[in-house]
Image (spheres, rainbow, N blue to C red):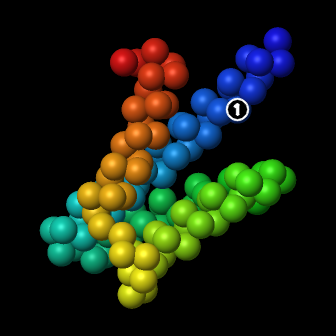
Amino acid sequence: MFGNLVKAVVDIEKEIMAIVGSEVIRALSWQEKGNKEYCTLAFKRAIELPDYTTEALNEKHRLKELKRLREALVDYFFADNSYGSTPEAWKNYFLAFNYAARFSVGRL
């Protein structure tokens, strides 16, 4: 019984990261097309979910990961990209969550 609860929490986290990833990939697409306005709107949607999630979580290791994610995204899109992120790296990072989320609910 408890194992199913843990699995449900992990599945929700995969879904959250997949949703964030879809917005980040959308922002990257608009960035490549030179549409700064739409890129910014997609970025803001991508940042909202981790922000709301960090407010709801009390587990430090999960909070750290979401805060690091936010920091790296802001660095890439609106700062000097000191982490050296690339569009391909972001796509690979988030596509793994997309695959995991789909796999966990039997969509693959």
97 vs 34, left or right, is right
Kindly indicate the quadrant of the structure image that contains residue 81.
bottom left
6 vs 34, left or right, is right
Kindly indicate the quadrant of the structure image that contains residue 90.
bottom left
Question: Is any part of residue 1 visible from this angle?
Answer: yes
Q: Position of residue 2 (x, y in %)?
A: 83, 18
Q: Position of residue 44 (x, y in %)?
A: 48, 67
9 vs 107, left or right, is right
Measuring 36% from the left and 70% from the top, which residue is drawn there? 85
Measuring 48% from the left and 60% from the top, which residue is drawn there? 45
Quadrant the C terminus occupies: top left
Measuring 18% from the left and 68% from the top, which residue is drawn there? 32
Quadrant the N terminus occupies: top right
Q: Which residue is mark 1?
A: 9
Badge count: 1
Q: Residue furthest left?
A: 33
Q: Position of residue 75 (x, y in %)?
A: 45, 78
Q: Position of residue 5 (x, y in %)?
A: 77, 23
Measuring 75% from the left and 27% from the top, which residue is drawn there? 6
Q: Amino acid at mark 1?
A: Val
User: Is residue 14 shown above or below 76?
Assistant: above
Kindly indicate the quadrant of the structure image that contains residue 70.
bottom right
Q: Nearer the viewer, residue 51 or 67?
A: 67
Q: Nearer the viewer, residue 10 or 31?
A: 10
Q: Secondary structure at mark 1?
A: helix
Q: Residue furthest bottom?
A: 80
User: Is residue 50 shown above or below 82?
Assistant: above
Question: Is any part of residue 22 visible from this angle?
Answer: no
Mark 1 is surrounded, within 10 Å at the Cα level, by few (under 14), some (14 to 19) or many (20 or more) other residues, namely few
User: Is residue 17 shown above or below 41?
Assistant: above
